[in-house]
């Protein structure tokens, strides 16, 4: 599918020195779709050294911002020209529907264009010190060598949220996609190369987290790590980074509440709850996996959700009639099944799904039916832990204060949704929720211009928006005295009485 070799170091596609190869499977049917070269620790060291050399030589960091912006625009144009190929790759690799892959690519194009525009408009910050002889300004400089590590649920999108601002800032990078879904990142690296990025600015290594990821995040020449993935991996990376006082930005998922008040518009609320949790079979960090619904409407609301969930067409992502695809792998499906068994054991009431589809045509893929648990309690693990699968839990509330308390009762804090017909209540509740994104009468959309990231265990730092660029920059204060004169601190006579 994508010709080997698959490692990109110092502007050249190279075979691994001490790595191996991995079979990449299509989760829709288990077939092998590619054999990908994987790095060993020597390959990682070479990639980091190439990024270091490129950075220290100023190959990219010293280029005018207009030139950096121009490269990002060319990447956006190339992605547009190769939209069909890249969408196909993403669907075969992740299992998501082709329609979703097209949406991802269009979002990625928008992100490259956004950062091109943002960096082109960036100016120094002038500070009035009160001294007319001094020009004081804060300038932005690239953070240095950046290790960019992405997960498998939105491989192209999550990586682009990192690569686009890193390149805009003038940083150099070593990129590591998930070993489960490396293909679209290989394609993107080829397009960035074609767009004319200097050698050594974007280096690509493949491989598993324990070997390749850890070698990358432990490298002393890495100045910044940007990671999206599981919470326990994020903790391990932060610990490792502390050794070299490396900057770290973490996006670690969520357990996201969707609060529905009795005065919400019923049909759009049902629709939003279904889409919020079952899109991409729940493999979304901001999925609305916790329905918190007013007790007066809960029975009807849940019955309607269960009826609609049973009608969702699960199938191969390449089949246009599929509404959602398989889980990313057999291993991941086993984890999701474990959570369903746990929910039953904890006493939640299974009202939809809870099993593989019966359709024999889906038997060789890692499919799982949209699943709903009613009568859940906040102390259940199924309510507190990120299952990353198509599982909705339902809790009921009586008062607004209770809804807020439930919505904040999570160690995560990535995203939340609120549905109400009362604007005053809406404003009160969205302000009270401790989450990085809160949707009022909507669920899921984002814009490249607005920050994305989490409170609590959902991570540190922000992607997208101006903060997403600042993540890859250092601030430098330049104090310029235009009329230097003798200060006189030591040359004048004593200013205080002798002791
Ligand atoms: O993630 P990992 P996994 C959640 C979700 C899922 C769980 C585990 O709940 O079930 O995380 O998924 C690399 N040093 N999310 O196992 O292991 C790894 O190779 C450096 C939430 O896939 O965190 C991959 O490139 N790197 C999430 C990336 O980290 C390491 C999206 C993510 O892998 C490493 C996906 C190490 N020690 C899963 N170990 C979200 N926030 O959107 C692994 N990696």
Image (cartoon, rainbow, N blue to C red):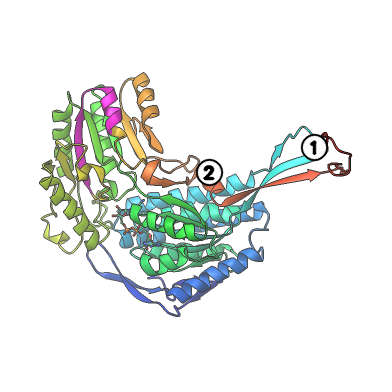
Q: Position of residue 20 (x, y in %)?
A: 37, 77
Residue 430: give x, y in percent of width and height. Answer: 37, 29
Q: Which residues are magenta?
A: 390-406
Q: Which mark is residue 467?
A: 2
Q: Which residue is mark 1?
A: 499
Q: How far from the left and from the top, in percent, is residue 78?
A: 51, 59
Crowd rating for badge 1 (residues with CA inside 10 Å; few <14, some 14–19, many 20+): few
Query: In the rendered view of the protein, which quadrant contains the N terminus?
Result: bottom left
Q: Is residue 307 left or right of residue 400?
A: left
Q: Is residue 167 above or below residue 419?
A: below
Residue found at x 42% / y 73%: 39
Closer to us: 156 or 414: 414
Q: Is mark 2 within 8 Å of ligand 1?
A: no
Q: Give the mark nearest the N terminus, 2 or 1.
A: 2
How far apart are the alpha carbons under marks 2 and 1? 52 Å
Of residues 339 and 187, the one drawn nearer to the viewer in this rendering: 339
């Amino acid at each position: 599918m994508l010709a080997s070799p698959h490692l990109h170091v110092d502007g050249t596609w190279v075979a691994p020195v001490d790595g191996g190869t991995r079979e990449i499977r299509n989760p829709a049917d288990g077939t092998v779709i590619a054999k990908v070269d994987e790095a060993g620790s020597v390959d990682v060291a070479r990639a980091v050294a190439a990024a270091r050399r490129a950075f220290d030589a100023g190959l990219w960091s010293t280029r005018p911002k207009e030139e950096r912006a121009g490269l990002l625009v060319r990447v956006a144009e190339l992605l547009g020209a190769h939209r069909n190929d890249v969408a196909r790759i993403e669907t075969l690799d992740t299992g998501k529907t082709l329609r979703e892959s097209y949406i991802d690519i269009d979002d990625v194009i928008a992100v490259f264009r956004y950062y091109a525009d943002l960096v082109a408009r960036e100016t120094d910050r002038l500070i009035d010190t009160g001294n007319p002889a001094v020009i004081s300004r804060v300038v932005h400089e690239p953070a240095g060598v950046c290790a960019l590590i992405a997960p498998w649920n939105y491989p192209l999108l999550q990586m682009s949220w990192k690569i686009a601002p890193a390149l805009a800032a003038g940083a150099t990078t070593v990129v590591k996609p998930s070993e489960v879904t490396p293909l679209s990142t290989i394609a993107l690296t080829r397009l960035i190369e074609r767009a004319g990025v200097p050698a050594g600015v974007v280096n690509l290594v493949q491989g598993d987290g324990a070997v390749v990821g850890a070698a990358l995040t432990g490298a002393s020449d890495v100045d910044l790590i940007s990671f999206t993935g599981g919470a326990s991996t994020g903790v391990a990376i932060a610990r490792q980074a502390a050794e070299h006082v490396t900057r770290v930005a973490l996006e670690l998922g969520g357990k996201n509440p969707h609060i529905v008040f009795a005065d919400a518009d019923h049909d759009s609320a049902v629709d939003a709850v279904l889409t919020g949790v079952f899109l991409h079979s729940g493999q979304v960090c901001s999925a609305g996996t916790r329905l918190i619904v007013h007790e007066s409407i809960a029975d009807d609301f849940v019955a309607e959700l269960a009826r609609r969930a049973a009608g969702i067409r699960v199938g191969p992502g390449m089949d246009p009639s599929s509404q959602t695809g398989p889980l990313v792998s057999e291993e991941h499906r086993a984890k999701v099944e474990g959570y369903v068994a746990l929910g039953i054991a904890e006493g939640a009431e299974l009202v939809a799904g809870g099993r593989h589809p019966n359709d024999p045509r889906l038997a060789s893929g890692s499919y799982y039916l949209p699943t709903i648990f009613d009568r859940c309690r906040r102390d259940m693990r199924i309510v507190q832990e990120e299952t990353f699968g198509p599982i909705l839990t339902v809790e009921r509330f009586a008062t607004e204060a209770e809804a807020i308390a439930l919505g904040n009762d999570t160690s995560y804090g990535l995203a939340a949704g609120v549905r109400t017909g009362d604007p005053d209540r809406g404003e009160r509740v969205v302000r009270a929720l401790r989450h990085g994104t809160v949707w009022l009468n909507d669920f899921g959309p984002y814009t490249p211009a607005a920050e994305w990231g989490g409170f609590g265990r959902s991570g540190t730092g922000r992607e997208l928006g101006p903060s997403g660029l600042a993540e890859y920059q250092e601030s430098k204060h330049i104090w310029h005295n235009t009329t230097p004169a003798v200060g006189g601190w030591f040359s004048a006579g004593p200013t205080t009485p002798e002791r």
